[in-house]
């Protein structure tokens, strides 16, 4: 499929913006936009990779949004800056993913709340109390409730974070209290440890309501399976029931593109986390699936039609 149109000497008629974090220097983060740029170009779309901050978005003295990204048909939003995404979307630019979908995934607590009451199996989750006073002692009575609801080990996650960072495991009460004190001023959640899935999970990529790639991630060193923390990716045939679960999860959260982490439980699968900007370099290498091409095709179909 090519949607390139001739307009004088211009090679491209269609233009897209790929917006990345203002400060990111990770190779994986920089590979993502470049791969998308290549695949969009092959479909006749000029895609500009721009760091957040290049467009000084603001609300001016007349209450209007000023400084928006003009001349683009869409934006692939690869940042998590919720203010910029809302301003761009409110100014009329079509985002992939939408502002609301990005926000739904950025906060792990919000993700689990939005997925609740929809038949989505998830590890039992207790939400950490918000604290604004660094001198206040941790509420031990609340930790008693965490113990009763979850049992040990307890997984503690910072609500904001990716690549396996900000995820801890408490094997006893002393460790639980230590982590609770450490994260007292940081939004966090407590979750049941799915022991059958220790050091392994499945990463499933969903695009446009379809599973396009999946891999198993395995670590022999850590209870977390993230490749960035030393885990290894393996080829994995996504079972039909797991695929249906992931597609339903993406639909509930309004995601057009996402990577979903699935745990292997004794009695079935559990949705662990959902990433609206999941890196796909690793899964492309492991599976041979051109994820960037599939995402680019979805974007073009949505913006320009089949």
Image: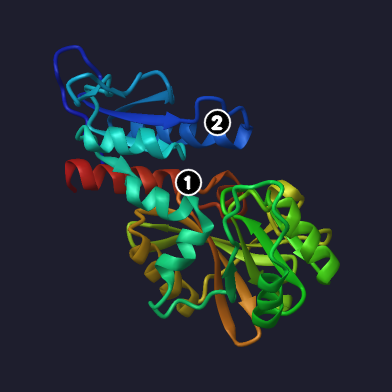
Which image quarter is the N terminus in? top left
The numbered dot on residue 30 is: 2
The numbered dot on residue 173 is: none
Decide: few, some or many residues near mark 2? Use Cα within 10 Å; few <14, some 14-19, many ≥20. Answer: some
Residue projecting furthest to the bottom: 267
Residue 6, image quadrant:
top left
Specify whether residue 113 is in view: yes
Residue 279 sits above or below residue 242 on the image = above
Q: Name the residue rendered at 38%, 35% in the picture.
A: 83
Place of residue 68 in the rendered image (x, y in percent of width and height, measured from the top left)? 27, 23
Discs 2/1, front:
1
Specify whether residue 213 is in view: no
- In the image, taking residue 229 as reference, residue 88 lies left or right, namely left
Residue 117 sits above or below residue 302 on the image = below
Decide: few, some or many residues near mark 1? Use Cα within 10 Å; few <14, some 14-19, many ≥20. Answer: many
Q: Secondary structure at mark 2?
A: helix
Q: Name the residue rendered at 75%, 55% in the picture.
A: 181
Q: Name the residue rendered at 25%, 19% in the picture.
A: 11
Residue 44 sits above or below residue 9 on the image = below
Q: Do residues under tags 2 and 1 come within 8 Å of each other at their CB atoms? A: no
Q: Name the residue rendered at 60%, 53% in the picture.
A: 131
- In the image, taking residue 33 as reference, residue 267 lies left or right, namely right
Give 227 or 175, whichever is nearer the viewer.
Answer: 175
Q: Secondary structure at mark 1?
A: loop
Residue projecting furthest to the left: 7
- Say which label, 2 or 1, has the lower sequence index: 2
- Disc 2 versus disc 1: distance between alpha carbons? 12 Å
Place of residue 36 in the rendered image (x, y in percent of width and height, measured from the top left)? 42, 36
Colouring mode (rainbow / by chain / secondary structure / one colour): rainbow
Residue identifier under label 1: 277
Place of residue 146 in the rendered image (x, y in percent of width and height, measured from the top left)? 67, 74
């Amino acid at each position: 499929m090519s949607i390139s149109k001739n307009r004088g000497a211009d090679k491209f008629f269609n233009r897209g913006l790929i917006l990345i974090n203002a400060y990111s220097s990770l190779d994986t983060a920089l590979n993502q936009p470049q791969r998308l740029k290549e695949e969009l170009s092959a479909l006749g779309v000029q895609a500009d990779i721009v760091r957040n901050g290049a467009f000084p978005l603001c609300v001016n003295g007349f209450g209007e949004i000023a400084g928006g990204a003009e001349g683009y048909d869409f934006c692939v939003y690869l940042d998590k800056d919720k203010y910029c995404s809302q301003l761009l979307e409110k100014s009329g630019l079509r985002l992939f993913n939408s502002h609301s979908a990005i926000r739904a995934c950025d906060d792990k607590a919000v993700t689990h709340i939005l997925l609740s009451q929809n038949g989505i199996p998830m590890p039992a989750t207790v939400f950490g109390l918000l604290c604004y006073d660094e001198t206040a002692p941790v509420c031990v009575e609340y930790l008693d409730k965490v113990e009763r609801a979850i049992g040990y080990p307890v997984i503690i996650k910072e609500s904001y974070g990716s690549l396996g960072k900000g995820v801890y495991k408490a094997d006893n009460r002393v460790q639980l209290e230590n982590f609770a004190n450490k994260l007292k001023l940081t939004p966090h959640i407590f979750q049941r440890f799915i022991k059958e899935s220790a050091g392994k999970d499945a990463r499933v990529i969903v695009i446009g309501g379809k599973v396009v790639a999946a891999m198993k991630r395995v670590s022999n060193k850590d209870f977390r399976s993230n490749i960035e923390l030393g885990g290894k990716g393996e080829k994995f045939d996504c079972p039909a029931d797991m695929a249906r679960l992931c597609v339903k999860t993406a639909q509930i959260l309004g995601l057009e593109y996402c990577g979903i982490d699935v745990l292997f439980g004794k009695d079935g699968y559990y949705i662990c986390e959902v990433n609206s900007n999941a890196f796909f370099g690793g899964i492309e290498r492991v599976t041979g699936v051109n994820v960037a091409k599939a995402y680019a095709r979805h974007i073009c179909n949505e913006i320009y039609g089949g």
